[in-house]
Image: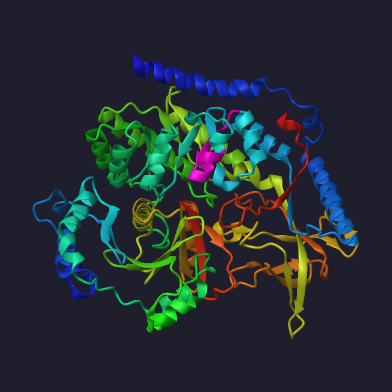
């Protein structure tokens, strides 16, 4: 009887998400900016106004805040949310907070009932501070130190992943009431590098891990996997869902009552429609409707909604005059963490050259080849090795990077002196 | 077998304690692990100037056993000077050049002059040198106490090639929080490491972030709040 009631609650919770989204009426401002073209025009206006404000402050001699800044289009996040629920209505998203912990993005996603995937104490504190209930949080850090497990237990966050026996013993000792997801690996080939973290348990080990969990009387409620963020192969999801079905069967053999499947993240904006169709079909094939399905998307929601503008602070011509080095006021130690941590290659485009704003000019690659460096003169602080710009720039000009929402906005911490980037929001009415 | 090799034996502890640890790593012919191959254990042995203890990722009871064993041997160790592992020159240089400017209390120069052997004393009272020994690797570290009383652990591994990243980081985080009571952890990563992109991405997933530091030409610093 308690198990049945719990299952019904889970099903109703999943339905509540769909109902909540269905009841939200379109806001007038959403109609105004409903098309990406209109958003693009608004972003250009925001860039122009902010830069003119900075230049007026410089003329008046005030200490101008000439740091790099973002323009955030929250309606872009909303459009992605609508797109998700149109394509994957059965899957409840748990947003990966590490991807972009901006407070307004989190507030928007919380308003529409999204769950959250937290990987650190700071993220847990931030999400709990929004008033999110602990049952809408999944704790999925690959390195579960005892201090983290204890902290999750003290906050009532019960949904956690595991993939080795050590974590089971640790959870048994410090968080015995947790609800566990067995994380399985999605690639049996050898890891590219020994220093990559080993994610997930192989299918050869899942049976033994479930036996250990059974002997420890831990509550394993389902399976999770994570296809890599850089994966462009839709069949990887199909393969992972098939593996999950096998592990579900192993769990049923051992007396577990599996009712939760976590299909991880790795959704790309461009390939989402095709991948979603494949996932929806595979889920309907392999799993009953009573199985609740969650996911951990990150960049899908925020990548295209943020654009970063940086200022050229120094210029240096090499002796052969063929290439030029530009130094801008932000780099891999600031808003462009994505270059180090996410192996991204952001494409630099000219935003303002002299007195010309060229944001909306769809200029392709140009003939002007250059390096772009960050401000720290550090050998790792390289933004672009071989950028092609249509114009030669001077000190004071501006460059922008599109799709700058994933792994760029840094959370405030004691290391960066709580100095986070400035963000200009296009329209915050959607949060009301 | 590899643990019987002299090169891999722990050499910075008393002989008795080294025997305890090495016997723990030795294969157990009667245990269940024998049939499935010996499983990997990551034990971290932390040696400070006052005490030493073992912490790490082991099955339930393993850590307690090691701690208990060392507790039993503690009275004898108390009467014997700890033999500290030799610190390689490049690690000493890295700590000297790359550590952030200390915010602790600088020892008075006059006190050093009165001592007579001031050259052999540490310059800052707030810094404490430690060592963390794993089965095949050794981490050199410094625990620094900030002005507000919080502590930061700085670590450099002797070799990244022998780091088993997941098990090692879990053991180090547990060690830093439960034993050293640190609130921050900073890792020094060699910029010339050929595996730097993969290592940096893994550190990011665990929760580290890059720290800008202009004095480091050879290392990148990655820090995490614990």
Q: Quadrant of residue A114?
A: top right
Q: Residue at x 66, y 34 (%)?
A: A108
Q: Nearer the viewer, residue B100 or A37?
A: B100
x, y (%) of residue B121? 39, 77
Residue A220 image-quadrant placement: top left
Residue at 24%, 37% in the rendered image: A211
What residue is rendered at 56% in x and 57% in y?
A415
Q: Quick check: A257 left or right of A427? A: left
Q: Position of residue A223 (x, y in %)?
A: 39, 36
Specify how the rendered protein is coloured: rainbow
Residue B135's place in the image compared with B11, above or below, is above
Q: Is residue A121 magenta?
A: yes
- x and y, in percent, of residue B65 in the image: 18, 51
Check the picture and name the quadrant holding the N terminus of chain B. Answer: bottom left
Q: Tell me: residue B14, above or below residue A124.
A: below
Q: Is residue A398 above or below residue A303?
A: below
In magenta, the rendered stretch is A113-126
Q: Is residue B153 inside the magenta stretch?
A: no
Residue A120, given in percent of the width and then of the height, sits at: 48, 46
Q: Note whether residue A235 is visible.
A: no
Point 59% across, 28% down: residue: A113
Q: How many marks?
A: 0
Answer whether residue A116 is visible to the viewer in this image: yes
Q: Nearer the viewer, residue A162 or A403?
A: A162
Q: Which residue is outermost to the top?
A: A1
Is B59 on the left or on the right of B147, as rendered?
left
The quadrant in which residue A370 appears is bottom right
């Amino acid at each position: 009887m308690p198990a049945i009631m719990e299952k019904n609650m889970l099903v109703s919770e999943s339905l509540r998400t769909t109902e909540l989204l269905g009841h939200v009426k379109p806001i007038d401002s959403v109609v105004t900016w409903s098309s990406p073209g209109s958003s693009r025009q608004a972003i250009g206006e925001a860039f122009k106004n902010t830069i003119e404000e900075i230049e007026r402050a410089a003329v008046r001699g005030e200490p101008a805040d000439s740091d790099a800044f973002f323009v955030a289009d929250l309606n872009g996040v909303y459009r992605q949310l609508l797109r998700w629920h149109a394509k994957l209505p059965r899957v409840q998203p748990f947003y990966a907070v590490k991807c972009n912990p901006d407070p307004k993005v989190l507030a928007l996603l919380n308003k529409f009932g999204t769950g959250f995937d937290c990987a650190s104490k700071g993220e847990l504190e931030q999400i709990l501070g929004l008033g999110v209930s602990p049952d809408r949080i999944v704790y999925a850090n690959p390195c579960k130190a005892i201090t983290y497990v204890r902290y999750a237990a003290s906050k009532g966050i019960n949904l956690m992943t595991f993939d080795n026996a050590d974590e089971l013993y640790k959870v048994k000792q410090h968080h015995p009431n947790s609800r566990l997801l067995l994380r399985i690996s999605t690639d049996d080939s050898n890891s590219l590098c020994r220093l990559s973290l080993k994610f997930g348990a192989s299918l050869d080990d899942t049976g033994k891990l479930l036996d250990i969990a059974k002997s420890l009387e831990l509550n394993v409620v389902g399976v999770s996997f994570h296809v890599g963020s850089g994966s462009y192969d839709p069949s990887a999801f199909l393969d992972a869902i098939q593996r999950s079905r096998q592990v579900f069967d192993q769990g049923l053999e051992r007396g577990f009552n599996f009712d939760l499947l976590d299909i991880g993240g790795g959704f790309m904006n461009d390939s989402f429609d095709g991948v979603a169709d494949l996932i929806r079909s595979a889920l309907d094939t392999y799993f009953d409707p009573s199985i609740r399905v969650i996911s951990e998307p990150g960049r899908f929601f925020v990548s295209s909604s943020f654009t970063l503008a940086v200022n050229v602070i120094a210029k240096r011509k090499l002796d052969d005059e063929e290439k030029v080095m530009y130094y801008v006021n932000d780099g891999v130690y600031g808003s462009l963490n994505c270059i180090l941590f996410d192996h991204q290659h952001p494409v630099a485009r000219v935003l303002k050259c002299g007195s010309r704003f060229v944001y909306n000019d769809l200029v392709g690659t140009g003939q002007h080849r250059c390096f772009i460096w960050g401000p720290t003169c550090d050998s790792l602080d390289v933004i672009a090795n071989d950028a092609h710009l249509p114009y030669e720039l001077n000190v004071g000009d501006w460059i922008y990077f599109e799709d700058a929402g994933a792994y760029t906005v840094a959370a405030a911490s004691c290391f960066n002196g709580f100095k986070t980037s400035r963000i200009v929001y296009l329209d915050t009415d959607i949060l009301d | 077998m590899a643990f019987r090799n002299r090169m891999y034996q722990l050499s910075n502890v008393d002989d008795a304690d080294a025997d305890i640890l090495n016997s723990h790593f030795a294969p157990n012919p009667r245990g269940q692990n024998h049939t499935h191959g010996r499983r990997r254990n990551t034990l971290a042995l932390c040696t400070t100037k006052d005490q030493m203890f073992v912490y790490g990722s082991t099955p339930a009871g393993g850590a307690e056993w090691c701690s208990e064993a060392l507790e039993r041997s503690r009275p004898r160790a108390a009467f014997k000077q700890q033999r500290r592992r030799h610190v390689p020159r490049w690690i000493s240089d890295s700590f000297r050049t790359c550590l952030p400017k200390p915010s602790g209390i600088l020892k008075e120069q006059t006190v050093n002059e009165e001592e007579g052997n001031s050259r052999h004393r540490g310059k800052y009272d707030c810094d404490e040198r430690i060592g963390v020994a794993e089965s095949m690797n050794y981490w050199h570290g410094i625990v620094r106490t900030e002005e507000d009383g919080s502590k930061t652990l700085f670590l450099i591994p002797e070799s990244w090639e022998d780091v088993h990243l997941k098990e090692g980081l879990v053991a180090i985080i547990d060690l830093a929080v439960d034993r050293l009571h640190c609130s921050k952890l900073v890792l020094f990563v060699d910029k010339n490491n050929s595996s730097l992109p993969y290592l940096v991405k893994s550190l990011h997933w665990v929760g580290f972030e890059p720290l800008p530091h202009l004095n480091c030409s050879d290392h990148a610093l990655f820090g995490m709040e614990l």
